[in-house]
Amino acid sequence: SQLLMGAGSPQDGSTATNITDDLTVHMIGGNVDGNTVFEVQDKGRTMYLKNMLSTVGLEGWTMPPQIYEAEDATISNAPVRNNTPSATGGSYVEAHYGDESSYVEWNVNAPSSGKYLISLRYANDNSPRPLSVFVNTTQDILPQEIIRQPANPNPTIPFNNIASNPDAGSMPLKRCEGDCDNDDQCGDGLFCMQNNAYESVPGCNDTQTNAWDYCVDINDFDYGFTLLPTGGWSGDWHYSEPLEVDLAAGKNTIRVQLPPLYTAGPNIDHLKVEGLPKSTSASSFRNPPHFMSLIPDYYPGGLGEQNLRDAQYETDAVLDHYFYQDNVAPFMCIRIMQRFSFSNPSPRYVASCVEAFRTGLYTSGSVIFGSGEYGSLEAMAASILLDKEATEGAISSDPSYGSLREPILKLTHLMRSMDYQTSIPTTKDGAPMQTTYNVKLWKIDEKIGQGPYEFPTVFSYFLPEYVPDSGPNLSANLASPESMIATMPNVVNLLNGMFSMIKYGLSDCKNGFSTYPGYSSCTDNGVYERSYGHLFYEPIGVDDYEKASDLALLLTAGRLSEDNLNTIVNACSSEPDQPSTNRCMQQLIVTTGEFHSTNRITQSGEDRVTETGVGDSTEPYKAIVYFNLSGGLDSYNMLAPHTCTPIDVYGRYRTIRGKREISAEEIVEGVGLPLERLLEIPANNPNQPCTSFGIHENLPALKNLYDNGKLNFIANAGLLAKPVTVDNYRGETPVQLFAHNAMTVEAMREDLAKEFTGTGIGGRMADVLTQAGIPANLFSIDGQQVVLTGEPGQGPSPFILSSSGLSAFNANPSITNMDDVIKALNNETTTDSGFHAETWSSKLSVSLAKQELLKEEIDATVVTTTFPSGSTADEFEMVTRIMQTREARRSKRDIFFVQDGGYDTHSNVDASLINNFSRINGVIQAFVDELVVLGLWESTVVVQFSEFARTLDPNTGEGTDHAWGGQHFMFGGAVNGGHVLGRYPSDFEQGDPERLALSRGRMIPTTPWDAMWKGTAEWFGIPATGPEMDKVLPMHRNFPQDILYNETVLFGSPSSTSAPTLPTPPTLSPSSSKAPTSPTAASSPVKVPNVQEGLFD
């Protein structure tokens, strides 16, 4: 195994020894030890590899595998051929035509006496072929023929010469029967042995027919090697089963030879000799074993440094490493506990589960659960479900106990507890219908935010660490994962669907969960005549109170408070009959916090006050659209280097992106973009290493905006807490780098020190504006997003809409004052009431208030531009509709969140980006066109982000992996565009002069997200200095102010596309200010602030 890890450079005082053109060893004192550095050339790159200390217990080898080429051995009566490149040494020995005098004999050196394994790499087109094996035949030591003892030998039987062409009735042929032509004519487990004349047929005796072929059992071959067919003579090479032999210390000979009477053998490539593993105590190695070689293997047969066996070893090793990693047990325990309704399990509870997972045992009373093996799920489940935190009733009085329930579980709970059954009405109009149906929940994930097998991302429906944007969970910083999808459209759709289920059965009625069954109308009469099935349960009790108590027992596990129970009974008492009363009570119960959480509640008796974020101001309207490209955008293919002197940055880009020359006729392009696939733009920034860059060919809308001075790129930007170097970035960047969930959330928060816990940059901007008397609203068109979360009571809470707009809430109420009753059931609670129930009630109240405010206005809007099809286009179109409601909302500042997915390109990055960029290009163009029509182009800025960039060095699947710094863009009518801001890297390899490159082209950002946000926040109305900007961007104080762009750099007057000239910072090289000759942009070059020389030294 290769025990190597990355090193910076050779050790001082080492001596270089050149091993091959691609490998140099730097040793101190001539010894290979912990100071040795291996210098490897690969794809034009120099890699330094060094041993690093760790301890691993392994079985020792007597001798590592050694290869002995057949063409270098002593050969008798067999020619050497070199007609195929697939032979490891370029040649092989052809024993296909020979006799018992044909052999190959190798000289083999063994480090010590003992047992060794030998195997042959051979090719054999058809029929098993035996070879005799002799060890030390030419020495004074007694020659030994090595015979492999058959595992299950058969008794020897006579030949059965059936016919030269046996008829179908004789098929399949049995052992020792002939004449066969191929293996298919022999019975199961038998092979057709192709004979020349009268060759020996193992397991058979008596009289055979000349040149007939017979069916044989491989278990009857007792030669040293019995070589099965490989399917070809010169291109299909296989290894034989290893054969155990005894070797003496020092020189030995190993001969393989055709047995007597055989006139045909296999073709032989090489002999492999390796020592048997021997038991040893735990050994110390300088790195965990790395089975796969770091040296690529370009041979067609894949038989060099990299092979399938090592890949299997490596896969097993890494799976074991993951499975036995210390974090697995607590990770699994917390995640499973959350799914069992414990959102914030205590440390003691988690520790108990961890112990059960690791030991494989859990004891409850006198019963022991588990297998006693690490990772026992039985023990883990028992530790969760039987612990006192899960079983003792008193703990439920803790307000932080329990969880909000998942939407799909609430729906299935309603259907199961209320006895849903498929039932097609017998009285219906239309043609006869099938009367048996499975439950048909049509596009349920789009309606309630969750559906079976419809995960929106690999991270499921919500993040396990998510803290809601309001309520006691936010104040206490307690997780409530399920509240992440408790958005306005999901809440409204869930209640509408459950109301429909209760009143009309499973159908499409009034935003129901299913489809139109093809008959009847929606009537709340207890007949369910337009449904696939309905709820059959009839509550037990002598009066409405008892019946309501029975329903509450089944729907809330008895948690429904006495106050809410009486409110429900009183509200439904005026219904004309008992079935109507029951349906009314069912509907009201499923709106309560007790149904939607596992908490009990205590109401304070006060009405809930819900703010809607409206106000008045003379400020002009402005909007920010936060455009997130989810998954980690490969932004080095969005904006690539083009014309660069004196440093050939483009050439370096192509090299690290995988371009290499295999031969004069074969060039591997890698994942980098050729010049002809780039839309060239001038840098308009003398501090860039290139005079021009190239936009991806499928983003012409960005080029058009750039050329017209309305779009800027910011190069090598990313999430930073402060300027860092390759030496201190881990300690000075308190975030889980390269992880989707952590980087996504923290990029939206922009507050790594957590000065304003749980908030996002958009929410904090709205807080500051609200406190300054400027009305602001927040909108997400793609679910709950932390970027829009502000401090409680400081500003507006976000509107959460779907891309299709808003559905009417409770369009056909069962009782006249039903909405008021629902609000009363979710009124203010006391401080010791259940946190998760309060989170539901708070979100429901806000959702209903905002629903009422927005729906009528949005429905009246008109969009004149035709947007492309697709969810992202729908989101941007909805943004233009919401903007049209600004006057009705009396809003002067809006912040929108929209998202496009599919950028986690671990494979086929080029094809993925072509598809993704083609999609968003049309969306961006349509959005700009509609803003112009609405007269809002000058009032809107779009800022694009992605959680991180990707490795410049591709993986083996033509994809790229998680990285850090990359490019992003901003555009709008007021933007002073046409510039590539920031500083594009000029070198992508580790050890680069600026010390920005980590492994595989992971770049440390030189420009923080704060740089673009600073000027954008100023344009939006945040004072440039003081506590307001410190709240919006709490980390901006950690950076030199001349690397943060102010409003005058990023924005100009509506008629201007250039910014005031700023002091010129140090440039990357004297010639980097050379202006491009082509193309030109609408804006003139501008001197922009950049990272100071030496800042990252």
Image (spheres, rainbow, N blue to C red):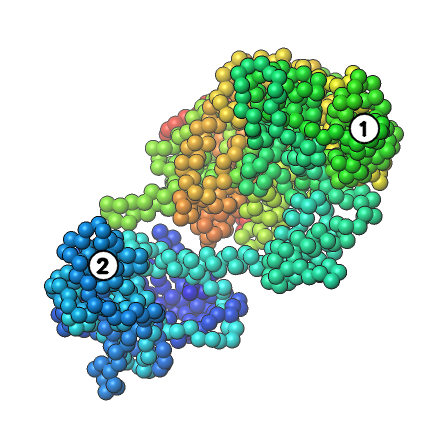
Asked if residue 709 lies left or right of residue 27, the reply is right
Q: Residue at x 55, y 14 (%)?
A: 430
Between 36 and 643, the residue placed more toward the observer is 36
Residue at the outermost right position: 605
Residue placed at 31% from the left, 57% from the top?
188
Query: Residue 683 lies in what quarter of the image?
Result: top left
- Please give the residue where the numbered disc 2 appears in the rendered image: 192
Q: Which residue is depicted at the point 67% across and 16% down?
A: 523
On the image, which quarter does residue 559 sit in?
top right
Circle 1 is placed at which residue position? 825
User: What amino acid is at disc 1?
Assistant: Leu
Residue type at mark 2 is Cys
In the drawing, does residue 1004 fall left or right of residue 301? right
Task: Please state the horizontal and vertical placement of residue 159, each as a whole percent of the image.
Answer: 19, 65
Q: Is residue 19 above or below residue 974?
A: below
* Whole-percent x, y for residue 987 in the image: 44, 47
Tell me which label, 1 or 2, sits earlier in the chain: 2
Q: Residues within 10 Å of mark 2 (few under 14, many from 20)?
A: many
Alpha-carbon neighbours of circle 1 within 10 Å: few (<14), some, or many (≥20)? many
- Secondary element at tag 2: strand
Vertical placement of residue 205 versus 1081, above or below: below
Observer-nearest residue: 656 or 212?
212
